[in-house]
Amino acid sequence: MRGGTIVGEHEVIFAGLDEVVEFKHTAYSRGVFGKGAVEAAKFLKGKPAGMYDMSDVIGI
């Protein structure tokens, strides 16, 4: 969803029989995505070709 100053909204829903758990992230600036891209590029510098994801970048 985009509107007003919202540039990105992401939601994950886990639905069971009698309950729902939701996680939501709303970004109001593209700068947050740019910062992540720069951090990922720094992480990849000097690394061999392979499969990496953001959990590798942020150390979780």
Image (cartoon, grey):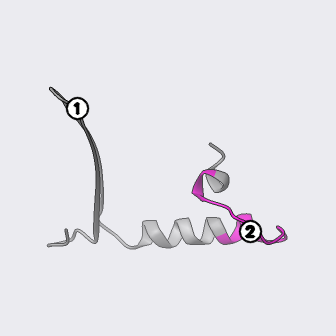
- Amino acid at circle 2: Leu
The chief SS type of the magenta part is loop
Q: How many labels does the image show?
A: 2
Q: Where residue 32 sits in the image (x, y, percent)? A: 44, 65
Residue beneath label 1, please? Answer: 16
Q: Which residue is drawn at 28% across and 72% down?
A: 7
Q: 51 or 60, which is in the foreground?
A: 51
Q: Quadrant of the N terminus?
A: bottom left
Location of residue 21 with respect to 51 vertically, above or below = above
Of tags 1 and 2, which is closer to the observer?
Answer: 1
Residue beneath label 2, please? Answer: 44
Location of residue 47 with respect to 26 vertically, above or below = below
Q: Where residue 20 sits in the image (x, y, percent)? A: 20, 34
Dot 1 or dot 2, earlier in sequence = 1
| Number of residues whose C-alpha sits closer than 10 Å to that of mark 2, classed few (under 14), some (14–19) or many (20 or more) | some
Q: 19 or 5, which is in the foreground?
A: 19
Q: Which segment is the magenta one? A: 41-55
